[in-house]
Amino acid sequence: MERRTIFPGWATPALLLVPQMALTVLLFLWPTAVAVRASVMRADPFGLSETFAGLDNFTALFTDPLYLAAIGRTLVFCGAVTGLALGLAVLLAVFADADIRGRGAYRAALVWPYAVAPAAAGVIWALLLHPQIGGVAGLLKHLGIAWNYKLNDTQAMIAVVGASAWRQVSYNFIFVLAGLQSIPRTIIDAARMDGARGWRRFRTILLPMLAPTLAFLVVVNLVYSAFETFGTIEALTQGGPGRATQTLMVKVYRDGVVNLDLGASAAQSVVLMALVMGLTALQFHFLRRRGGR
Amino acid sequence: MTGADLRARLRGNLVAGNLVAHAVLLMGTALFLLPIWLVFVGSTLDSGAINRGDIGLLPRLEGLAIYPRLLSPAPGGVPVWRMLALSFAMALAIAAGKIAVSLLSAYAVAFFRFPGRMLCFWLLFITLMLPVEVRIIPTFAVVADFGMVNTFAGLVLPLTASATATLLFRQAFVLVPDELVEAARMDGAGPWRFLRDVLIPLSRTNMAALFVILFVYGWNQYLWPLVVATDPRLDTITVGIVRMIGPESRTAWNEVMATAILAMLPPTLVVLAMLRWFVKGLTESER
Amino acid sequence: MNRRELLAGTAASAGLALVPGLALAQGAPVQITFWHAMAGPLGDELKRLCDAFNAVQKAVVVEPVFKGTYPETMTAAIAAFRAGKAPHLVQMYEVGTGSMLAAGAAVKQVWQLAEETGVRLDPAIYMPAVRSYYSLPDGRMASMPFNSSTPIMWCNKDLFERAGLDPERPPETWEQVMTAAEALRSKGGAKVGMTTAWPTWVHLECFGAIHDVPFATRANGFEGLDAELVFNSPPMRSHITRLLEMAKAGTFTYAGRGAAGDSLYPAGETGISFNSSGIRAAVVRDARFRPMAAQLPYDPAVRATPNNSIIGGASLWTMTAPDRSAAEYKAVASFLAFLARPDTDASWHQRTGYVPVTLGGAGLSLAQGYYARNPGADIPIRQLNRGEVTVNSKGLRLGRLTEIRAIVEEEFETALQGKQNAGAALDTAVARGNKVLREFEKSVSR
């Protein structure tokens, strides 16, 4: 939906955009362009020899059945992390927004996990989830479940999704809470007059008002799960067992930073970027059709 | 009854009584705090306990002595408080810089119509897409060209160049009613005054939320600070923690975990400060 | 500083005075930047080493800088090199050796450095199994051996005793390992009979070296970039089959890739564990049981007498930058010469748990009574000097070896899940690995 009332002129907006655009062009777009260029090159890591490879790097990707399988796996992983992290965050935020005792403490506690250094969190997760010496294994054993995520595909996926979503719930929580807090009182009053209660009120009043925030969060969560979870995956499964938890970014990182295969890594980055942008565009399109924004 | 009270009560009715709310929140809190609690417990154990997988749910009280020891100046090495201070400055600069820059650009995209507007938006938007890990080599080259290797600016600026905040502000601005803009223009308010007097106060809660998130984002940065700074005086606390964890080394796990706990304190303070602002921003804008 | 270190310092300064140029240097000392990946107490030990060098002479100051894990250090060094700001020295893990050798003018190999600066850096003083990993086929040294370790077998004496096994006699052959693991599970009540860290390094790379079976053609890659992987030969196949059978019987527990398998042994949960010798210091500190180090077992059916195992760890590479002067390279060479001194090497070995890389360092440690005081600390050294260094036990010289290891571990895991047998796993890994090698070959040929 477009805004009807706008300010005239283009000089002011240009001025407003200068700092952001300068930073973006110099420190993001330019390096990204270099990375995209690398995707059609075959080069040694030190940049001593470089030959034009055309679409070789891309052909190699799309003729590799293992890579194609990783695309599907990444979609599942991103969907699971985003759904879990957002769902839990909305649930907790709605309750923490209510007028109950100690809500300040709840709020602070729920934001906390975001502040833990990822390196320390990785160590703790690996320890907690360890099949032989971890607490989770012991707990599940009482329930009759044999926990061995090192060799069980499904359990491995659950482990990395859970550990990845854990931090992100805090992130989502704070924005959903902020969104709930900025809903105008008049709207809630009106709903009260209508006698809307519970779930219906959440669905008809709060959810539409949260839509812009949620749209933002879906994008951010997709981006997070696609690009920023490889540290967690490295700490727990390194993509295994087999390739059960190898997402596209795990491979980008492995090829780029560990194997120094810069051409392949760049080509994968381009594919991954296109994928996430496509998902985002799809989401915006969907929201617009639904009348949300 | 004030507006806030009424509102809160209405929200309270949303759940079937406070009991459910407490139950859900308590369970959520326990689930989410367990790993943090384990970090704390680990900090009080002997230095090899984590390596042995020997960790329970109760801290060892005499192990608490690790904290004063860590904060006292270490001979030779970079003291923990120094790394904390540098991380604090870095996180603050990143959060403040991003918010300022993004507020302006989101304002431009949302409230003006000019050629290339959507192009600008999408250009900013794709900066969400590639994390610094992937473009680290070309980014380093740019920073080196500007002579910013080993400087505070070199540490901060590349991390400021992303558009998360722009996206959020744009989403928040969409909710601002047209009537409000109309009224402001009728009053003779120009774009700058509208921004200062209307938009910024309206965005307070979002800004507070963003500040928390961006601060912690900056706080936890690892790879970029590691690569761009070769001067130990520019070591952040995150680099400091990773430097303590040596595979095949007699890693002092209690020190690692205690440092991780100390590293949580500044972000926690920011969270607490901002949460207060949440409620305040709310009541003020409603008055 | 104790007396021995004082003596070491005096000896070192006497040695350095003989290095031409250094003793005569005037004015401000030459600054040398040394990027490394030594975290935790190892980083402190590295700093001690640099401090010791800085103390015994005044012409050069070496500044160690921590740059993260090995891959992160490598990435940082490459980014810096491309911007003309490479460090003087960088520590690079052994699996990165292939990539560094292809780095051409970005690095100065040790023999080149010695030739240009006139500083003597003699390959003959190093242990053969260590030197060979970092040397060209003709014997010239490419990088400076530094922190080195090798996988060994760790046993839990307490669990051995409970299982009715002789705690002083570790199994020597794979047959005996299987029997012991079986007893540990059934009679000893051990949660885990046998486990392993570094599946590829231990069970293919070192297994090949010990039994003189090739991992790749062209002398494991030493003689050319066109090497092809051949680790799907019958001996390797039967070894992997053995591991799969043990896993099925519950006597072998898979613990993950790379170093992930390091967590079970110190926890006291496993009777037998294959880990790097480098975990020694942590084990001595943390184990609540009586640990025992032993040499890697062998299979007499493949080879009657076992050879040396392959090292791991890292070496030091001298990097180049556009504005780097001859004096700086000379300073680097003098620091490398300092590291090669027996007293430096022995002290590093004893304080970190890495193996000594020089024969002199090992000899000095023996003379100082270190192995008498620390039983088992000599196991990795004896294992590295077992038998004779052959083309199959020099080490590996393959590009993107990290990726090949990951591929092997992926296929091994799939086999452990019961989705394929050992032969299929190794065949697939060889095919996929060869693709990686060909891509690497293309990227570095100019």
Image: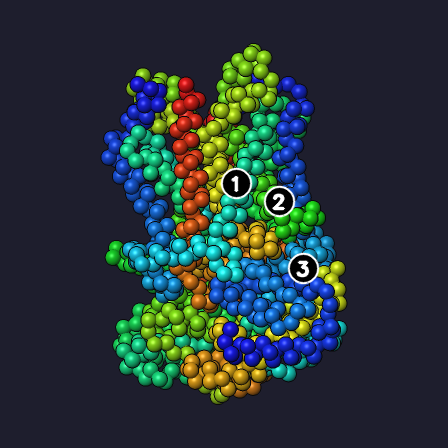
What residue do we see at 42% from left, 50% from top?
B262
Q: How far apart are marks 1 and 3 (CA)?
A: 30 Å
Tag 2: amino acid: Ala
Image quarter (top left, top right, bottom left or bottom right) of the N terminus of chain B = top left
Q: Characterize the local packing of mark 1: few (<14), some (14-19) or many (20 or more) Cα atoms within 10 angstroms.
A: many
Q: What is the secondary structure assignment of the residue under circle 2?
A: helix
Label disc, if present, on residue B153 of the rendered structure: 2
Left or right: A48, with A261 as reference point: right
What residue do we see at 58% from left, 15% from top?
B189
Q: Which of marks 1 and 3 is in front?
A: 1
What residue do we see at 40% from left, 38% from top?
B272
Tag 3: amino acid: Ala
Which numbered disc flags the more N-terminal residue, 2 or 1?
1
Which of the colour schemes (rainbow, by chain, secondary structure, one colour) is used?
A: rainbow
What chain is tagged by disc 1? B
The spot of residue A30 in percent (x, y) is: 67, 44
What residue do we see at 50% from left, 70% from top?
C200
What chain is tagged by disc 3? C
In the rendered image, the vertical position of residue B109 relative to residue C394, given as above or below: above
Label disc, if present, on residue C86 of the rendered structure: 3
Label disc, if present, on residue B92 of the rendered structure: 1
Work out whether residue A164 or residue A251 is closer to the camera in this orientation and state it: A164
